[in-house]
Image (spheres, rainbow, N blue to C red):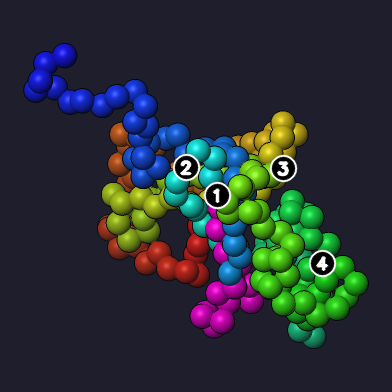
Amino acid sequence: MSESTRFRPSGLEASSGGGSKWLGYCAVGILDWQDKSANFDWADVYLVATLKVADSQYTQELKLAGSFDKEPNGNIKTCTLLKRLYWLFDAIGFDGGPNVKGEMVDGDGKDVDIVNYLNINHVTDPLNPTLDYTAYIYKEPGRKDPSKSYTTVFPKITSNNAEGKKDLTGYIDFMKSKNLIKEVVEGVVPPVANGGIQPAKDDSMPF
């Protein structure tokens, strides 16, 4: 090897910021939960799960945020946010959820501090993490500047087994077929819509 060529031993893998090793369907464990709904007037729910990703020293965040659709009497009704909450709760084994008023209750219908409950019952040991789930992690183009990209975790996880991955793969393929997942493709510069004027990416649109 010439002294002027780059020295990169085979054991030095690409970092999570630049390589593809930690993109796509990844085994993950949940280290921590946060509730950021108080920071945003529009958010009935803003849960953030910090994920341990297989073979990576870096964590990723799964964000599930939005507001409920409501009946004229104020009761919540079927909507995207409610569906995604139950995808998440079913995956981790939490038998509670929002009541008709949108307030979190446990499986017995008792009020629950959701983040405190999840942090006690639905996290893995950070020193010896178990990777119980499969997540889809991808690069999303920036809304203001499509030349920039951001790592995003789709807000649906499944069990870390063949059946769970098949379920998640089928759903992600469906979302892509409907152009509902905007994913950066290496070597392709996303077009700039509206003459370059785009809405800012903010926390009202976590994905």
Magenta residue span: 35-52
Residue 101 is covered by the magenta coloring = no
Q: Residue at x 40, y 42 (%)?
A: 16
Q: Callout 1: helix, strand or loop?
A: strand
Name the residue tied to disc 4. Answer: 96
Nearer to us of marks 2 and 3 is 2
Q: Are marks 2 and 1 in contact (CB under 8 Å)?
A: yes
Q: Looking at the picture, how far across and down is residue 111, in whole percent?
A: 81, 80
Name the residue tied to disc 3. Answer: 159
Q: Earlier in the sequence, mark 1 or mark 3?
A: 1
The residues tagged by marks 4 and 2 sit, at their Cα atoms, a distance apart of 32 Å
Q: Earlier in the sequence, mark 4 or mark 2?
A: 2
Tag 4: residue type? Gly
Instruction: Check the picture and name the quadrant holding the N terminus.
Output: top left
The residues tagged by marks 2 and 3 sit, at their Cα atoms, a distance apart of 19 Å
The residues tagged by marks 3 and 4 sit, at their Cα atoms, a distance apart of 19 Å
Name the residue tied to disc 1. Answer: 52
